[in-house]
Amino acid sequence: MIPDQSKSRTIDDLNARSWEAMIRSPLEAGSLAEEAIRLSVSAGYEGGRAAAFLNAAWSAYYRSDLSAAEASGLKALELFSSLNDLAGVSMAFNILGAVDHERGEPSRALDRYMKALELASAAGRKDREASSLNNIGEVLKDSGELRQALAYFMRAAEAMKAADAAHPAAVELEAQLFANIGQCFIELGETENAVEYLELALGAAAVSGDTYAQVLAMNGLAVAARRRGERTEARSILDEALKRAAETGMVQAAVETRIEMAVLLIEDDEFHEAREILDAAVADSMRTGTSRKLSECFRLRSLASESLGDYAASLADFKHFHEAESDLATERIAQSAKGAEIRFELERARNEAEIFRLRNVELKDGRAELERTNDRLKAVAEIGRSITASLDMEAVARTVHESVSHLMDATGFSLAVLDPTRRILDYRLYISDGKNVPPFSLSADSPDSFAAWVVSRNESLRIDDADAEYKKYIASDRLSFGRSTASIIFVPLSLGDRVVGAVGVQSPRRAAYHDEDLRLLSALGSYIAVAIENSRTHEEVRRLNEELRNEKASLERLARRVSKIANHDGLTGLPNRLLLGELLEKSLSRAARSKKRIALMFMDLDDFKPINDRFGHLAGDQALIEVSRRLKSALRDSDVVARVGGDEFVAVVGDVEESAAVRVVAEKLIAAFSVPIEVQGENCPVGISIGIAIYPEAARTADELMRRADETMYEVKRSGKNGYMVHES
């Protein structure tokens, strides 16, 4: 049936209006899409029907009706595929990826977004490439890969600029990109950079009417305001963000805003209000199946309940948090595996395209070689899928050796796993001169190991004549290859920039390997690295699950231990810089409400370095433990003392009535070091320089108070050390 032109124009207009209304009013957009679907069926206009189903999918997505979004997205995919519309298929994969992302399935989302990107590129549509790159960046951002996410967002911005006039990038993409970049900088702690992009996002969102980008940007600006100590401003921003999300029915945007509200309320000791906010966030997430933020909701609600003394609820939420985190850990492994698999599929696609071209020009020799390479790539992909499904590293090593033997000479073979803490390479399989060598370990910094060489540099190596070339890489051949070895390949096993091991093959023949062999082993290395991480994470999850099966008392101890590790200095047991920031913010908030003063004392030890130089760092660590004991004994239980650097400490003294009281505290701290510290039987004099800044006279924000106290401490250092000085406003 040839569609009536006037009906086609009506349907196209409905679809255009639906898309224009999408980010402003998803409900209105959905109604327009349903009307377009109805008309396109009667008109026989399949292109219009495909676009209408795509709009219906996005409308349902923004309303957090993920089941409806998936159903409409799959229908759009079917219709665009039947029309051979590559750009349309790309858009359908994008909405399906968005649904998977909201459901907390990042690996599946990444798969669909990568397909969308490949199709957009094949169609020559820079506007669609920009959308797909932005979506991939969002998955990476939510998975904590912030630097990689920023790289994708920047690539999306470049693609957006390169879009042609016939297919310009959607106006709302600019707002979403700016908001995403700003959120990344917020997570990285780069608040000033974040604010710049978030304000740009707000401006762009106002032009495009993109409510979701507005809410995302406002959430980030609220965090920035909170960090500046502008807590009233932060609350006002979040109230407005929640109002806008509610007006447009954007449930996931409302959940993200409620999480930021809860953080603010918990910091202000308003635990009942925080729990109520989080109850609503959890209910919305559970009702709509948008599980992406559930883990954080459970974590914060557990903290609020613990502070209220409701330990049963706290422990229940802590368990829910752990279960959600375990699921995410499994997803992240799958995401890494999916990344490796996608790289293979792209490589295979390039080879298959080249095979087709060579067939057309009848270059039989080239065709045969490429087909052989493609067959080997397929074999490597099969090996990869097999080993990433295993959790037994010894079994993985045996499978890799057996499989690689069919692809290249593996008379000699080794697979080593890096223990990053001990800097040790543990060999899970080592075959020399055709014989198995019992498992062993060696230093990852060994000068006599090819594996250590590639691990330390994250680079591959290929040697055609071991006797002639080994000295380029190692000092001695005594550990590295058997007597009959002539050719060698070693590649690092990497996850991003993080090396987790090395794999190598050796042959008794000179020049036995080619560049293609190196590429294949490197490609297989991506899968082996995922298998290593899979095994490690599985073991860690198994261990945590075993701990969580204990009774309530065990769970309480675990919660306290996790909190202490995250928030306390491992040597002295004092709060670390992270916890100090939280405690200082709370102290400032209470002081502002009660009109009280707070003294912040920045302390740096005098003449401590000679202890480390003379007696070594172990003795220095023992001395620091004694320092922390003396500092705590000189302060009240209600005061806070934290270790913020090697020999730097900060004290927060509350309820200060007058400056004279602060001076008394400072003199007590100095007096605590009037007696030398005993180190290995010798008395070592240690002094302390103290810079003091008082709230609100010196500063009103945590960052500014720290800076004033730090500057004042250096004035003490310059004036002769072992004393104190109060910052004068």
Image: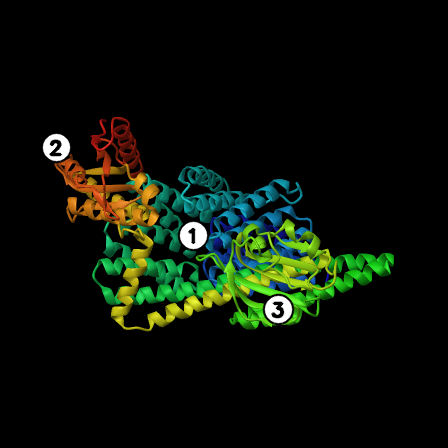
- Residue 26, numbered circle: none
Sequence-first tag of 1 and 2: 1
- The mark closer to the camera, 1 or 3, is 3
Query: From the viewer's perspective, is residue 303 above or below residue 429?
Result: above
Q: How is the image coloured?
A: rainbow
Residue 425, image x, y percentages: 51, 60
Query: What residue is drawn where x is 81% and y is 56%?
Result: 357
Q: How many marks?
A: 3
Residue 385, image x, y percentages: 60, 68
Residue closer to the observer: 708 or 113: 708
Secondary structure of the residue carrying numbered label 2 = helix
Residue type at numbered disc 1 = Thr
- The mark closer to the camera, 1 or 2, is 2
Q: Residues within 10 Å of mark 2 (few under 14, many from 20)?
A: few
Q: Residue at label 1?
A: 248
Displayed quadrant of residue 337: bottom right
- Give how far apart the Cα atoms at labels 1 and 3 are: 64 Å
- Give how far apart the Cα atoms at labels 1 and 2 are: 56 Å
Residue type at numbered disc 3 = Ile
Residue 75, image x, y percentages: 60, 64
Do labels 3 and 2 touch, CB within 8 Å?
no
Query: From the viewer's perspective, is residue 64 above or below residue 152?
Result: below
Q: Residue at label 2?
A: 660
- Residue 431, numbered circle: 3
Residue 147, image x, y percentages: 50, 47
Secondary structure of the residue carrying numbered label 1 = helix
Sequence-first tag of 1 and 3: 1
Query: What residue is drawn where x is 29% and y is 62%?
Result: 559
